[in-house]
Amino acid sequence: MTPTQDSKPALLQELRTLLGAAHVLDEGDLSAWEIDWRKRYRGRALAVVRPGNSEEVAAVVRACAAHGVALVPQGGNTGLVGGGVPDASGSQLLLSLARLNRIRAIDPANLTLTAEAGCVLQVVQEAADGAGLLFPLSLAAEGSCTIGGNLATNAGGTQVLRYGNARELCLGLEVVTATGEIWHGLSGLRKDNTGYDLRDLFIGSEGTLGIITAATLKLHPRPAASMTALAACGSLEHCVALLMGARATLGAGLSGFEVMNRLSLALVARHFPQLAQPLPPASWAVLLELSDHESAEHARSAFEALLEQALEAGEISDAVVAESQAQSHALWHLRESIPLAQSEEGLNIKHDIALAVSSIPAFVAAADAALLRHDAGIRFVNFGHLGDGNLHYNVQAPEGVDGAAFLREQEPAVNRIVYDAVVAHGGSISAEHGIGELKREELAQRKSAVALALMRAIKQALDPQGIMNPGRVLAEP
């Protein structure tokens, strides 16, 4: 949808009246909002608007609907699929939710916290911690990503194994609809069977159905103790066997189970040599975390029993257990530095995929072999959340090959090979990053016709003008 030239000045003047001129930006350097985190998508906004509360968001939407102007909502701009930046037309309004950043309420008895969409995830974690509780959503971008974006993409992170995705951590939402109305759905109820679940409809919709402005989130008791270990494995099959043993030994206390292949940690060593790596290089490394509600002694005893059993079974060749919180943070920092190290290495082809845990070794073997037949120099930066079946299967250019050229020339063929293998093994092409613009055409090819028809019907019903983040998730008719 493209506004007429005559409508642009009128809309911008109306927005300045609504929000104040300081919060309507249409001149100067707007690149902080127009370029995505990966520097892959560069758009041009009609303007950037920064409403300060839900009522102002609703007023902006009503004004855009009246003028036929599309909106692109944006939180921390940390997305990886091009879903939060405008296109290059200069006709889309970028709506930043950064000023909606208040913690509205904490209810310790109900184990809930209500936060506005622009609250940075780390701020929510700290607010929960200040109340003696835990908000367990945790990901590498937690210092800059926002709750609204986390919910709009149904973010996952490192503790999905125990606590679930963002969807499982949300009880209620406040949403501005495409007509500029506010749905006040900030329920703290865990049971509410009064019709269709609108909350789950908006979570994961990437701003294409409405704009999340606040959320009521689930909190959890803080564990009495946590324990972290890094183990070396010779194969993915051994990693899966270790996971099965960890589940049996640690039960619900197992809160993290991450895998990293040799090249992942080699790139961290290359680009961040100051980060100590306590184990010799191995085909795979596993990062395990136990959150125990009994005691540190109980956690250590359980961990040591698991690792001794795994050593005897040949599932691991070596392991180290963190002796302090600082050492635990250092081990997690290795894992969280992989995307940054890969970025330093050069542009790459990212895949955020989900499979049944039991299918992951066979998928990786098949995909690796097919890609090496395509280009024998391809490098695999393979890591992710094995505990919940989410793998970041990333493909790096051969040594000495320009990353941008590799991306430009090889991405279609690489994606086809990877996604064919994902589908052949019963998996999903998107686990936690969303669809955005990056995977829009892939979704159209790989999703069933029935599912796509249902999704289009929902989009048409809730956004008949097509002004909510058009061109993301679903291709425009």
Image (cartoon, grey):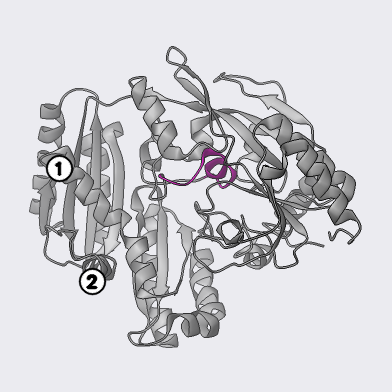
Residue position marked by numbered label 1 in the rendering: 306
Question: Which residue is more in the foreground, 15 or 122?
Answer: 15
- 1 vs 2, front mark: 2
- On whether residue 237 falls in the magenta region, the answer is no
Counting from the top left corner in percent of width and height, residue 430 is at 53, 57
Q: Give the quadrant of the N terminus.
A: bottom right
3D distance between C-alphas at marks 1 and 2: 32 Å
- The stretch of residues the image draws in magenta is 143-154
Task: Give the answer, above or below, for where 416 lies relative to 358.
Answer: below
Near mark 1 (Cα within 10 A), the count class, few <14, some 14-19 or many ≥20, is: some
Q: Residue at x 29, y 66 (%)?
A: 264
- Tell me, for residue 270, which label it has, or none: 2
- On whether residue 144 falls in the magenta region, the answer is yes
The kind of secondary structure element at disc 1 is: helix
Q: Residue at x 47, y 60 (%)?
A: 352
Residue 332 appears in the picture as rendered: yes
Q: Residue at x 39, y 47 (%)?
A: 139
Counting from the top left corner in percent of width and height, residue 439 is at 60, 64
Counting from the top left corner in percent of width and height, residue 65 is at 85, 45
- Residue lying farthest top? 109
First along the sequence among labels 1 and 2: 2
Residue 15 placement: quadrant: top right
